[in-house]
Amino acid sequence: MTLQSELNCQTCGACCSYSSDWPRFSTELEADLDLIPPQFVAEDQSGMRCEGNRCTALKGTIGKEASCSIYGLRPDVCRACMPGDAECLTARASFGME
């Protein structure tokens, strides 16, 4: 079994609440960004809206049960984060998760 298969994003959510600087838009098409509900987009349109470090689209409790309320519409930066990659492990470590 690999580390990626052992990590369950739906019991984590750390990557979505690690840094308000992380969920920045960079490679998305304008048409794709237009599909994201405006209440989840930062006022300056640079990325996802955060409250503190937590993305406002994240629902649930970090480390217990978490999910993205716009999963099918999430931006490329969110799609690129993979269970067990460097960003994932850094975010998990910040919450004391191994």
Image (tube, helix red, strand yellow):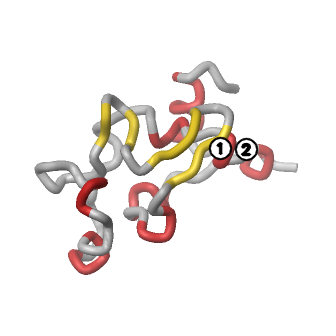
Q: Residue furthest left?
A: 44
Depth-wise, is mark 2 or mark 1 nearer the camera? 2
Check disc 2 and report its element: helix, strand or loop: loop
Left/right of residue 95 with respect to residue 70 in the rendered view: right
Amino acid under label 1? Answer: Gly
Q: Is residue 69 left or right of residue 30?
A: right
Direction top: furthest residue: 96
Residue 96 placement (x, y as % from top left): 62, 19
Q: Residue at the spot x=21%, y=75% of the render?
A: 30
Q: Residues within 10 Å of mark 1 (few under 14, many from 20)?
A: some
Examine the rendered structure and indicate whether residue 32 appears above or below residue 56.
below
Can you say which quadrant of the picture contains the C terminus?
top right
Q: Which mark is residue 84?
A: 1
Residue beneath the point at 24% across and 73% down? 34
Q: Quadrant of residue 63?
A: top right
Per the image, label 1 sits on a secondary structure element best described as loop
Badge 2 amino acid:
Leu
Disc 2 and disc 1 in contact, CB within 8 angstroms = yes
Q: Which residue is mark 2?
A: 7
The front one of 1 and 33 is 33
User: Could you say which is closer to the camera, residue 79 or residue 58?
Assistant: 58
